Image: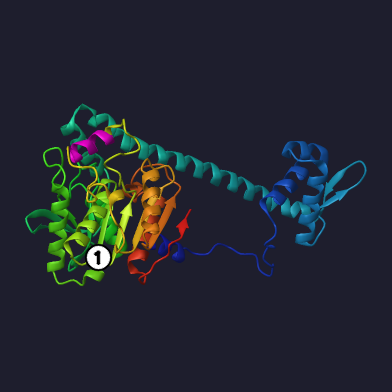
Amino acid sequence: MRAGILDAMSERPAGPRLLGMPSAADAIELKHLRAFAAVADELNFSRAANRLFVSQPALSRQIKALEQLIGCQLLRRSTHRVELTLAGEALLGATLPLLSDMDDAIALTRSVGGEVNARVTQLWNSVAEDGGDGLAAMREAFEALNAQLPVPEGTVVRPVQTDGVSSLVVAPGPGHRPSVLHLHGGGYIAGSAFGYRPLAGALAAATGTAVLVPDYRLAPEHPFPAALEDALRAYRWLLGQGTDPERLTVSGDSAGGGLAVSLLLKLKEEGLPQPGKAVLLCPAVDVVDPPDGGTPVARWFSLYVRDHPPTDPLLNVFAGDLSGLPPLLVQSGTEDVTLPETRRFVDQARAQGLDVRFDLYPVSTHVFHLFWSFLPEAADALEQVAGFLGADEGGSAAEAG
């Protein structure tokens, strides 16, 4: 997804270069240059050491190491004074702008990082705030969140009826047949295929294949098992398109991730062929007893569960036998609200013999993939999804940090 940026970088004209100079030693570190700049500014080792909050012997060792790495004397020391050599003056002239640029780069990165986090938080907060006035307001706020996100350029969207379920095929261009069934999030009470065009489009662009997004029925008007029945109809429709099941993928985010697992268990129960792989993005898999029991999310799930027996494995996937399901890629953020139940699910799946790859990203927002257009971790995660779907069977079972 970042090919355009990389291409632009490769075409950028090279800046001026000094000829005949060997490259700097790999062992030279930023701390060496900062130590040298402080001594050159103070012309006094004691004051420079106090400024850097290091001992004077430690500072002396850093300067000596730098001189050894460069191969020439930078400072002349005597009992009463410290002076720069000509080589030292040359290095100082080049070092000060470098250190200044480094400080500016760090400040800019921290600023941008803070702005990105603030933007994501603001977007999700708008759902919580605007959706606090009831179910209709919640649904409208969730659609408004997705409406602020871009659909990748060149995306082609067309409506289809998948065995009676209204759906959208979201493709990276014309002529693509869907091979990914994506079940959207929204706590089983909100979300739509239309609203999920940005994420489905990003998934299609990353994987190079079309994505089928069914408009499954929502609670409380249609509690369990309505959403599962619609997901099954959409999958049966995909099977009817003549695609080899091994080339199909079932994916889902948040509540859609939990629904994806329920669908895989339902396929097993019905004796239908499993897809080749499955992808779960920040999945909410515990709808019966969510860890955040007093929150609005738990109340949404209760509208979906209603009075259905919590021991039904198609509803409570922790009560199910996960053996025989396809290889899984599970992605989550280090501070995602669903991470505890996600870890529990991954542990259970591995214990029952599943091939599970579990990737963690240093983000705090739920379903960070939604923000692929400005959040680098989201773009990276989608690239990993593409790699997983394109990899040979039997992916890694390692957990990435």
The answer to which image quadrant residue 291 occupies is: top left
Visible in this render: residue 1?
no
The answer to which image quadrant residue 51 occupies is: top right
Q: Describe residue 4's horizontal placement relative to residue 255 as left or right.
A: right
Magenta stretch bounds: 297-306
Mark 1: amino acid: Pro
Q: Describe residue 157's horizontal placement relative to residue 326 as left or right.
A: left
Residue 69 position in % (x across, y down): 76, 60
Instruction: Name the chief secondary structure element in magenta.
Output: helix
Residue 210 position in % (x across, y down): 22, 63
Which residue appears at 36% of the width and 51% of the height? Answer: 345
Residue 248 position in % (x across, y down): 24, 66
For the N terminus, the image quarter is bottom left
Visible in this render: residue 348?
yes
Residue 6 position in % (x across, y down): 42, 62
Which residue appears at 73% of the width and 46% of the height? Answer: 35
The residue at which mark 1 appears reads as 275
Residue 377 or 64: which is nearer the viewer? 377
Residue 40 or 138: which is nearer the viewer? 138
Q: Describe residue 124's horizontal placement relative to residue 377 as left or right.
A: left
Q: Residue furthest top?
A: 133
Q: Describe residue 243's horizontal placement relative to residue 351 as left or right.
A: left
Residue 261 or 204: which is nearer the viewer? 261
Which residue appears at 20% of the width and 57% of the height? Answer: 266
